[in-house]
Amino acid sequence: MRITWRLVLGFLAVSVLALLAALAGPSWPRDGGADRGSGTAAAPSPGRGAPSTGQGAARCTVRADTPSEAARLARPGDTVCFDGDLSRRRLVITTGGSREHPVTYAGDGDAVAGITIEADDVIVEGFRSVRPAAPGIELTGHRVTVRNNTVIGPRGGDGDGIRFFGDDLTIARNTVRDTDNGHGRHADCMQTFASGTPASRRVRIEDNRCENVDNMCLMAEGPDDGEGDGRGTTADFTIRGNYCETLRASQALMFEDVRNATITGNVFAAATDHAIGLACHSTGARVGGNTLHPGIRYEVGIDASSRAGYRGPEPGGPP
């Protein structure tokens, strides 16, 4: 009886192994691979020399160790990724692309000691700066997009997180945290002005987070605000979907000589006196759909020079 049981077990084991082999099938791909005669090869697995991807970016076409090497190699339409350690140096971008084919600089979470952009037709995304020299990001150019970056604790200067100058700018999905008003600074999350710098037009500021910001989430000053150089026009701002936590200023957003600002769908998360200030001929503003902290006294403050073309909630007082 003992011998018969062992034979049964052996037979069962052989049968199970045969069944598993049949189910596994051949080791070559049946579908979706390189079919015989199709003319399409299967994609190779990425190796050391294969292009990688940056955060939210297309496949890298240029790899560089330094910003100067990137400036030398980049061409319109390229996506530049960095292999070198940039954590102790500022990323200075001086090479752009074209209107149809910007150059993308993709960080994929890389640490940098701040970012300076002095070029047209560029996209800068996915970099992280901790305690950079202020402003953490400064951009001057046309058709520039800055997105998915993080600036924490900018220091020195006026303490700003992001400064911008130029036309057709997009600032989206960035996080600026822990700006500090100490030592007489006015440490805004974002700022623009027109005094020896270009006036800014057609600016989109969307889905950013300004967290633990001592001064304003946005200070925007045009060329005729009383301190500007009088050249050009600052106009056509869209401020939408941002989170704003400003701790020490009277208002979260301030516009002086900025025409046609649209301010919708933002969250004002701290108890400022009012949320939005419109002054110095900041005409044509449209305001609506914002969420206010219950400690905010009124949503919009406005002066007489900015009333023309205003559409939104009834202003509650001065800017």
Image: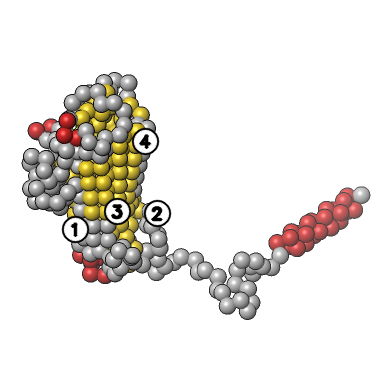
Mark 2 or mark 1, which has the lower sequence index?
2
Q: Nearer the viewer, mark 2 or mark 1?
A: 1
The Cα–Cα distance between marks 2 and 1, rounded to whole angstroms, is 22 Å
Mark 4 or mark 1, which has the lower sequence index?
1
Q: In the image, what residue occupies the spot 81% across and 59% down?
A: 15
Which residue lies under the disc numbered 2? 56
Mark 4 or mark 3, which has the lower sequence index?
3
Q: Which mark is residue 118?
A: 1
Q: Quadrant of residue 28?
A: bottom right
Q: Residues within 10 Å of mark 4 (few under 14, many from 20)?
A: some
Picture quarter with the C terminus: top left
Q: Is residue 110 visible?
A: no
Amino acid at pointer 4: Gly
Mark 2 or mark 3, which has the lower sequence index?
2
Mark 4 or mark 2, which has the lower sequence index?
2
The Cα–Cα distance between marks 4 and 2, rounded to whole angstroms, is 24 Å
Which residue lies under the disc numbered 3? 145
> Which of the two residues, 55 or 194, is positioned nearer the viewer here?
194
Amino acid at pointer 1: Glu
Amino acid at pointer 2: Gly
Q: Nearer the viewer, mark 4 or mark 1?
A: 4
